[in-house]
Image (cartoon, grey):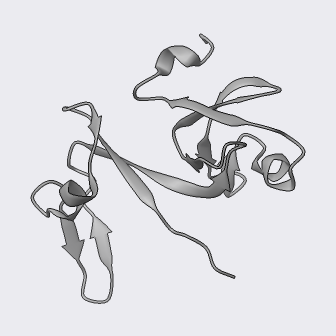
Amino acid sequence: MNRSIKFRAWHIAEKHWLTESELQNSDRVPVISHGDHFELDDTVNVIYCQFTGLLDENSKEVFEGDIVSSQWGNLEIKWSNQFACFTPSIVSMVSGYVEFEVIGNIFENPELLPKT
């Protein structure tokens, strides 16, 4: 099984996605070495969003924090510790039962989500 492990990073203070070169710059995104593994320093002003492994109906990669349009309306993709998967209903999306499209993300387009 070949699975892509990818992340993207939103800079909270500067309000933009960090580029690959910014992510590789240890001054921008500190990496803490523990000898046999590395850890991202979560004290910096960055939110990391993981790739779900899914593509939407337009073959666009779906990341945590994305907002998708589906038969259930506009929904945020989140990690669920309770179910150990990305929600909403990723099983349905993977199975092809639900068509969905990435229409934005919670950082740049929060207005796309219903008011709670």
Q: Is residue 51 left or right of residue 11?
A: right
Q: Please give the count of numbered marks on the rendered protein.
A: 0
- Would residue 21 be found to the left or right of residue 90 on screen? left
Which residue corresponds to the image point at 68% horizontal and 35% vertical from the top-left?
A: 101
Query: Which residue is painted at 30% across and 76% down in the image?
Result: 38
Farthest-out residue, left:
27
x, y percentage for residue 61? Answer: 57, 51
Percent of width and height locating residue 50: 49, 55
Which image quarter holds the C terminus?
top right
Q: Position of residue 102 (x, y in %)?
A: 61, 35
Residue found 19% across the figure and 32% down from its top: 14
Q: Residue furthest top?
A: 115
The quarter of the image holding the N terminus is bottom right
- In this rendering, would 37 be left or right of 28? right
- Extreme-right residue of the structure: 97
Give the image quarter of residue 10.
top left
* Image: 33 above or below 51: below
Of 24 and 65, nearer the camera is 24
Q: Please, which residue is most extreme toward the front here?
A: 58
Q: Quadrant of residue 12?
A: top left
Between 26 and 60, the one nearer to me in the picture: 60
Residue at image x 66%, y 51%?
A: 55
